[in-house]
Image (cartoon, helix red, strand yellow):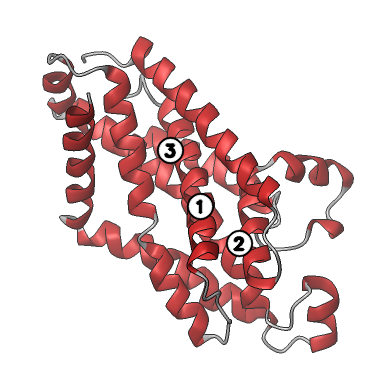
Amino acid sequence: MMDQFWGLFLREIKRTYRNPLVLVMTVVQPFMWLAFFGSSFANAPPSFLEGYFHTNNYIAFLLPGVLSTSMLTVGMFSSMSTIQDKRFGYMKRILLTPTPKSTVFLSKAFGATTRGLVQIPVMAVAAMAFGVALPTSPGLWAIWVTGLFCLGLGFCSLFMTLTVTSTDWQTPGVISNFVTMPLMFASTALFPSASFPAWMQDFSRINPVTYSATLGRAILLGDPPWTDLGYLVIFALAMVVLGAWVSSRWLKIE
């Protein structure tokens, strides 16, 4: 099973580098958020930034949120890859072999999540250009990347679970737009939750994006809370188990 997983996983990774446009867009989109949205508070008084964002550099507050929200979109790519394989007959050839359906699912989820991590070094360099002081400890970086990986893996699994029976190109994009917006704005990715209405604060407390943004922000600005990482690990495991079970039952030869 590991050989089958590894072969399919490498195929997903190779497909990324064979499509430079997708790779460029994966990196450029969060960079644009950082550059344009992050600059919106460039002339804000330092007292306001310190009081509201607890830092005098809004981009330092925004960076973990942008990286977290960008990991939401990698789930759409895993769903589109699955649909493409169905429409062009590759999925049929794979499912006719002894390869378990859960292995197919896992290879695509891990492949798409790994692709999403490509943007981290680029965003780190961009953040330093905007004056953000990044952690120098390899251990802190390992915690941060692990949290982002768990967030991306969880949402890749969720998106593939929702589209496992679909062969329509438009389905992943529609679901992505429907899911991404409320998860992004009802989290602490862009703003602190203190100014949210009560119902939105309640939603933010269970939103995985909030935990990923808070984890990265604590690494930049303070001590990382291990409970945030634990929440993301549990979220990823739950979604992977759900996705593997759904795929084993409903992923079929078209």
Residue at 73 percent of width and 63 percent of height: 191
Q: Amino acid at mark 2?
A: Gly
Spot occupied by residue 134 in the image (x, y as percentages of width and height): 55, 77
Residue at 40 percent of width and 70 percent of height: 121
Where 19 sits versus 107, above or below? below
Choose mark 3 or mark 1, whichever is in front: 1
- Regarding residue 179, the answer to whether it shows in the image is yes
- Numbered label tally: 3
Q: Earlier in the sequence, mark 3 or mark 1?
A: 1
Mark 2, Cα crowd under 10 Å, few <14 / some 14-19 / many 20+, is: many
Spot occupied by residue 145 in the image (x, y as percentages of width and height): 48, 57
From the image, tell me which residue sits under label 3.
156
- Regarding residue 169, the answer to whether it shows in the image is no
Where 130 sits versus 79, above or below? below
- Rendered image quadrant of residue 96: top left
Q: Which numbered tag is attached to residue 216?
A: 2
Q: Is residue 107 left or right of residue 198?
A: left
